[in-house]
Image (cartoon, rainbow, N blue to C red):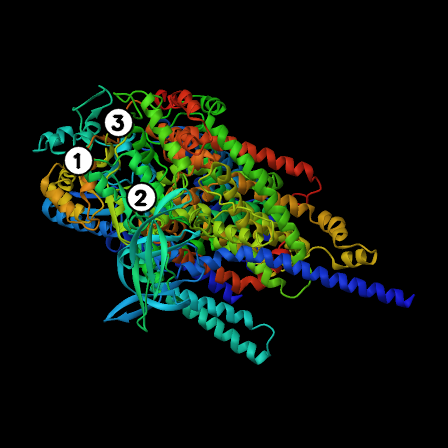
Amino acid sequence: MKLRKLGLLVVVLSMFVAACSGETASTTVAPDTTEVSEGEGDSLRWRTRPDNDEEAAVYAGISDTLAAELGIELQYEPGGTETAGYQQNLLTELAAGTAPDVFWLPGTDIADFATRGVILDARSLADATDHSDDDFYPGPMFHLTFDPDSGEAGGVLWGLPRDVSTFGLYMNVDLIQEAGVEDPRELAANGEWTWQKFGEVVDGIGALGGEVVGYGQSSWWGPYGYWINAAGGGFFNEDRSACALDSTESVAGLAALAEFYAESSVVPWGEDAEAPFRAGNVGLFQNGRWATPGIRTVDFDFDVVKLPDGPGGPSNWLFWGAYVINANTSNPEAAWDLVAALTTADVQAQVAESGANVPSRVSQAALDAFLTFTPPANNQAFLDGLSENPTAEGPLWAGSWPEFVSVMDAEVGAVVTGATSIEDYAADICTLTESAFTG
Amino acid sequence: MTTEAARDKRRRQRRSILGKAGIYFVLSFFALLMVFPFVYMAASALKTPADTFRYPPKVLPRQAATVEVNGEERPLFLLPIDGIDTEVVLIEEGLEAGVFTDPVSPEEELAWPLSLALPTGELVTVDGESLEVYAVTVGDRSSELALKRNTVVGRFESTAGDETYAVVRTAPAAESVSAEWQNFSEVLQRPAMERALSNTILVTVLVVLGVLFTSIMGGYAFARINFPFRNAIFVTYLGSIMIPFIVVLVPLFQLMVAFDWIDHLGVLVWPFLFNAYGTFLMRQFFVGIPGELDESAVIDGATRWTILWRIYVPLSWPAIATLGTFSFLYAWNSFVWPLVAINTANTESYVLTIALRQLGGQAVESPNLIFAGIVIAVVVPISIFIAAQRYFVENVATSGIK
Amino acid sequence: MGLPQSSKEERLAVNATISSPVRARPGWLMALGLWQLLFGLGSGVAMGMVASGTGIEVIGTPRLVLLGALGLAALLALLSVFDIWRLAHRGRLIAFVLNLILAAVAGFFTLQEVNVFNGLDALGANFGRGLPFLAVMAVGWLVSGWATGVRPEWERALLLTSRGLMAVGAGALLLSVGLLPGLWTFLTRIVQPPAVIFLAVAVLAVLVLRLVKSSQATAAFGSTSKQLEVIDGIAFVSPNILGFLAFLGGPLVISLFVSLTDWDGLGEASFIGLGNYIELLTDPFFHRSLLNILFFGVVAIPLSVIPALALASALNMKLPGMRVFRALYFLPAVAGVVGVALIWKQLYNATIGYINYALLQLTEFVNLIPGLELTAPQPQWLSNPSTAMLSMVIVFVFSTIGFNTVLFLAGLQGVPPTLYEAAELDGAGVWGKFRNITIPVLAPTTVFVSITTTILALQLFSEPFILNAPQLSPNGPDNATLTPVIYLYQNAFERFNQGYASAIGWVLFLVIFAITIVYFRTQREDGVLTS
């Protein structure tokens, strides 16, 4: 009985302790990561999603340097990866009022956040400094200056791009040599790197048999979107106000992809292609620059080559994300200074050196820093992607991008796996995505 | 008649032995299914990243055997030399080679360097394809083979100095079982993990104690004290078990925002100290305790508070242990609410489920670390369960869940 | 914490008051009446402030609820003043309830102001240091467990050791997690204005509570033991009821209201009546999610209940080794769904995963039979729409079957072994015993297990959420694993249609409610509410 009383006492006491140490925590022990710094002088929290641990360390270092330069107290917090719900968490925190002052957003989410009024139009802040929109690639800047009210670009400023990225084909050079097929790098250099040659290389590698397959991609909109774009088609019409997935070119591109998946040696649709590529069983693996640092740990010889040219000529995506400012920040001026400082050529060069990203600023110094990250030897493949007719990823100002994508993903998957015929798809797809535009 | 009875008995015994064997077989089969994922988890937690991507997969963690050649560690392979599997070292890679085949039996293939093959200038048709014929030298024998396609091979050498050639990728590597224990320290060094472990323990301890306290109080009131609308209140309260937590997810989140608890550890504790199920469980157990005990105690001048803690609680250990176990499992493994209520950035308030999910997204390139994280997350509840399992089922049984 | 025992003298005094023909109204009673009067006026003033929006600003449903509650409190308090003057027991009861609520509310605000609730973070930061001492306490507790059933002289020593270990462990734990600095900051904080006022109110309310419950009051009001029992009952259920109202009942009401608005969680909400529910009727994604969960439930629920029943009756045979099996089956329930799902995600991998490899090996083995040339199935478990939900079923069954087995085992412990023996004498076989004894006896358990499994299954979320990431969204391939809860989560926290999300929650609740009622109907003689 005494024991039990003692136990009870312990519980009560420890609750008490839990309670009381509160002050020690908020003042000395824990840094103030959990509350929006309201009017507490120049102190900002910022967040970006690193691609790997090394990059997180680079960002933390940059944060310290910039804090000293700008005279602001900075707190860098790495967000989760996209797959671990980066955007959802941001929205949840915005609703709870605990979101950071400055944060990075994937390009496709700019419209959603801007139209909700949770990010700040920084145009007037930018005009007070020596900022110029032309220093960055025009694709991202179109969306970052798009005003949903007037329907035109150039007026507002939602933020500045952190970096850009393109697709490349990661090659297992060992497999290519073993299969005795033509080297894609040479084909690309000679301008013969077409869908037909691509198919031959893939089948040649697949002929090795066993677990080996020629090609793999992940089943999100980027990889299949390339096939649609490279055939001369696209997701949207010219002013991105309606679906164009049923145009002849778009349908042809998807049909080619479906045929390729039906007949060639590929990682099954929807399965993770990165794991078998790392296991050394995939010849060509289509992915963005962000995969490079991770892939460097493989124990076979690897390199990259640009995506093959489609019937509509060369094509690629220009992926990007931007630093934006929380509409509720207590210190917009300092937040803008931070955004500007995070996107200078110097900072972009530092990030580019860690290998996962291409600088978003049209600056030779930053590009040179990017090229120093080897292997892969053929880093230029990613820069080629930038100059050869890339389609900039972008939000849907006239509708809901998440909704559009969720319908499109399902329908495209059905075509590639053979559950839907391409004719039915062509007839229905733009009706099905209609709700994304009407809201 | 006696003999018949004896025969009958023998038959019954035989049938019962067969039946028992069958039962053990079925039980073992299920047990294997239940346990294999955990064995796989534990073994994979000790692998190298490359080992986790291996195909065909192996359960036990393995590492390539190496040997020191000229001060350099080099991997060992097992290749046939003169028909005997020999340990060999890879000396040279990327030799231009051909895949050769005997025109007579075209399904057999040999990858051999072109430097050891001389074109004869002849052509032969194999499977409808016209192929060049080479004189290929293997060891001290030369044979005429058709070249199917080009490839590359590596040159291997045994300790005895014998040479052979093979495609490096498919050459079987010599391996030994070995464990990477540092996976655990590595995963604990990740920002979220260590805090997540101690946070989870803290949250779980508080929730279990709180639920026990409120449930014992409420259970006693509903079992033994008469007050107006008692049964109506009890049924309503019990009915709330049917309300999916998800219905209140949104308003509870907003309430926590209003209290400014979001993102703090408390948000995982305070709303979960009240549990209709626990109250129900305790009530059912208390109802079974003879009521005369209270009456005599009341006559002795004891208050209900002392009756509850001095008489009822000591008699109710089975129910308390059961409720404790259930709320432990519930608190330790809760996922949806922490996912919503704890920010990504605030790793200081992480619990294990959130940290694991984050790890699953971040460490795709090294599943060994994910597995090490899972091991850390499950080892505490599993060892507590193993330590307490002697009491557990008996307790569930006597606690009145029926 | 026990209530004060009345001493002999007091009891005598009480008898004296009761026997005296004229009931005097002592000072404490006047004070109580005055306090209740103040209470009523205070509630009235607060109500006015909320109504006019000065000082206290609350909007929406909470405002209406608060107004109602304050108004009711004011009325009741004034009523109790009247009753106390009349020395009617009702006044005592009302005073008790009102002050109990006041104490809880004021206590809550005190702790909130002192930052007690969020102070848990600080404890969390130091808690790691205390863990070894927690282990010491656990060892002490285990030692006390060994103390029973040993020789008496040993028992004494063991008990002493156990107490010593627990006491030392507790002390060291508290010190190591920062008891002293914590106490200090607590004391400095609690004396500052808002906190100290709340504290004073809370302390006053508690004092009034003690007064109301005291034997003096019993005597003065002449309350019967039945009436006293009511007060005790209220005191004992109050933690549960208040917690229920604050964290489940209250949010539930808000949720119902939010489901009738188009609230996005960020800005203003406008009332749209049944708009959300009407939209749900034509929402193809919601329909898909319902179909998916229907399929899931129909497959997964029987698979996690029926084999569990069979396993439990096998385990119930008194054969050696059953304990080991029981422990093994319970492992997945202990390990938790996130960890289990992450393990299965690797096993399911279609290209390098273990399951497909095992299928390959198995097929090769079967093909050893001459004449057979089967090709091994290599399903894309997670990325093929036709197997994706099946993969979820497997993980769900894996993690629930052991738990259900233990529940069934518990039910079987209630079956007297003589019942089986009698059946054996009658010549019943294994199947006969199972059919004629086990199943009828376990009927209530089966209902219970089926209901809990159903509630769990219909709220499927974590499995698809973990298993599909990162290659696919939680919806799975072609929305094959889109469940109502995932759809709710996405609406609430990704698209911020919180009104719509609440409507989904209510529809799901109605479905679960209806199914539960059906279960109860099939098993009327259940023992749940009758005992």
Cα–Cα gap, marks 3 and 2: 22 Å
Amino acid type for the residue under numbered disc 3: Gly
**Label 3 and label 1 in one chain:** yes
Residue drawn at x 28%, y 71% is B68
- Asked whether C162 or C114 is in front, the reply is C162
Q: Position of residue C309 (x, y in %)?
A: 65, 50
Depth check, mark 3 against mark 1: the one in front is 3
Q: Is residue A328 above or below residue C332?
A: above
Report helix, strand or loop for mark 1: helix
Pick whichever of labels 2 and 1 is earlier in the sequence: 2
Chain for mark 3?
A
Q: Nearer the viewer, residue C7 or A239?
A: A239
Percent position of residue C328, x then y: 55, 59
- Which label sits in the foreground, 2 or 1? 2
Say what secondary structure mark 3 lies in.
Answer: loop
Please give the label number shown on residue A283: none
Mark 3–mark 2 contact, CB under 8 Å?
Answer: no
Q: Where residue A284 is drawn, which disc sits there?
A: 2
Q: Is residue C283 visible?
A: yes
Residue B196 found in image quarter: bottom left
Mark 1 lies on residue: A332
In the shown orientation, is residue C86 left or right of residue A422?
right
